[in-house]
Amino acid sequence: MNTITAPAIEYLQLAPLLIVFGAGILGVLVEAFAPRYLRRAMHIPLTLLSLAGAFALVIVQTIKGVPTKPSAMGAVAVDGPTLFIWGTILVLAFISLLLLNDEDHFVPAASAVPGSAEEERALIEGNVHTEVYPLALFAIGGMLLFPASNDLLIMFVALEVMSLPLYLLCGLARRRRLLSQESAMKYFLLGAFSSAFFLYGTALLYGYAGSVDLAKISTALSANVGQDALLFTGAALLGVGLLFKIGAAPFQAWKPDVYQGAPTPVTALMASGTLVAAFGALLRVFWVAIGELDWDWSPIMWGVAILTMVVGAILAITQTDIKRMLAYSSIAHAGFLLVGVVAIGDAKQNATALAAILFYLAVYGIASIGAFAIVTMVRDAGGEAWHLSRWAGLGKRSPKLAGLFAFFLLAFAGIPLTSGFFGKYAVFQAAVAGGAVQLVVVGVVASAVAAFFYVRVIVLMFFNDPAPDGPTVVLPSWGTASVVGFAALATVVLGVFPQPVLDLAQSAAGSLFVR
Amino acid sequence: MTTHYLILSALLFAIGGIGVLIRRNAIVVFMCVELMLNACNLAFVTFARQHGNIEGQVIAFFVMIVAAAEVVVGLAIIVTIFRTRRSASVDDASLLKY
Amino acid sequence: MELYAPILVLAVLAAGFAVFSVSVAPFTGPKRWNRAKLDAYECGIEPTPQPVGGGRFPLKYMITAMLFIVFDIEIIFLYPWAVAFDQLGVFGLIEMVLFIVTVLVAYAYVWRRRGLDWD
């Protein structure tokens, strides 16, 4: 009998993941055994403490030194970029959860038909689906695992662990139930469709390399000559799955629908955390596994980047709904980030581009959570006031709120003295150094177009007369207030003193992805 | 020898993909997605045979579990929307646009 | 051929048990008349004429079916372990216990939320 040796698993390196997943499982137990009135009070500390604990462990890991080889027998790579991404996702998730836990954004009984007596009764009894906390934790755990996975199987499982809870969370909005359910269905069907593409790509690359390990695929590139059909089809299918998750054109169709229909705190979590995680995974696949093929994939990536920027910027102009507009803006930003992905070159160039992308992801994520937090505060009788015409004259009625929103929009536009400026500057600079000058020109033009619709909203808020029956601005709870405050502060500070975080991103990116 | 299985898997994947694009009932669309996942499984197992390692077979297990989880989440969403609208057609759900 | 002898023995035993219990039951068991017992068996549904278009099933069938799928498919990970548990040793055992405990957490949730109750 030959014994199989137990695999070596670096538990300390994986501890942030284990904590978040463990807290999710504990959350399910709370749901099962705690009485209803206690559940919320137990979930909030459990969720927030686990995220804070995971963040502390990420810092400890960073101080102790970045591991130089993948952990868990090569399944998960906890390297410099991963640690930076983990830190970013945990901060973004923490503030999204403050927003999520804040008020009753969620439906009292998801299974009840909207408008039925059953729903009425659940509303009167004050039911809430406290399951959203464990669901969010599982989604966040998936987001942490997705960019860290060093083989395609783990990446696929992480993709699903991240997506499945999000599909459910999208359908749980308390108001405008039909829109919410529709967004959940669309997100689910399209997401499942794209993950099938990802999986078939994985299968073909496995057929090509005999392994799904990213490093082994990379070494197979030079060893197996003459199986290009498998390799290129596989890489293309894999790319479709990943580009769908970041919402790059032509796979962007789900984004406006889902961002609009989902409960706004969930939209904030998706717009920040999912984007960061998906970009991490995209970079790992394209730079580690098939980085040697950059001559083959970068022309296509050029096209995708240009299309994404143009589609995002131009379609955003035609929007009349604030959440859809922010969704198209998120598509445009995915395009700007793709400009950085194309800027692949030698090791030094890669480190610069990677640092720029990491910084951009962090600042964009924080600003977008801030913007969505403000969207939750502007309310009509039927819920949040989404139509842009309702926002007219908001600057005259509540100047502070409108001022903060305008500030976040300026950060999206990349105006100097906001964090968005340095993010965009860093990415475009890296792209110029990488020889993608034409792409940067397109990016700058798209930014100008994008700035137009951001400024249009600002003009609408400050220079138009308010409607007599305009929306009310609800007094924010401490959760929402602290989210908006933190996001605004971070956007200012990173707009004036970006250096510490830029340095951090550079040192994280300096070691590049381990193989 | 394994080529036939790969062709079959590619065909299944294509049938599933086309089904997702042309069918209108959400349940059928979803079954087509599952067909695509099973096509992936066939490809994994075939390649495992071809390479003589069992990694592909192990992956097939994980894919089956993920597919089951997806079925449960997906059916829950589809049934909820069906109860609201009395229809599972993906064309009827069209409030979100432009 | 010897390899298959145990299977053959098992098949004979199983068939013998089935024949034995079915043939003995009429003599030993009580006989109480019940209309439902004489109906055609349709997985617990009352056999009624089907309406046009197949008719609708109550939602609880779907919940039961979904729970079945989820908990049934988890067994897939037990098969490889069952084949190689002696080689996998203590580490494999701990991993499987952790896995089953995680599944049990989900089971506890379903049970406490009355997902297993029929009515």
Image (cartoon, rainbow, N blue to C red):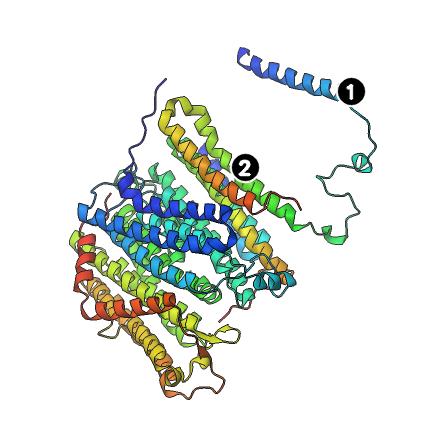
Classed neighbour count for the residue bearing mark 1: other residues with Cα under 10 Å, few (<14), some (14–19), many (≥20): few
Residue in the foreground of this view, choosing between A357 and A64: A64
Q: Is residue A434 visible?
A: no
Q: Which mark is residue C72?
A: 2
Residue C25: quadrant of the picture: top right
Q: Position of residue A361 (x, y in %)?
A: 29, 61
Q: Position of residue A292 (x, y in %)?
A: 25, 48
Residue in the foreground of this view, choosing between B17 and C90: C90
Image mark 2: chain: C
Q: Which mark is residue A194?
A: none
Q: From the viewer's perspective, is A167 left or right of A428? A: right
Residue at 26% from the left image edge and 45% from the top image edge: A78
Q: Position of residue A381 (x, y in %)?
A: 52, 76
Classed neighbour count for the residue bearing mark 2: other residues with Cα under 10 Å, few (<14), some (14–19), many (≥20): few
Q: Secondary structure at mark 2?
A: helix
Q: Is residue C72 above or below residue A173?
A: above
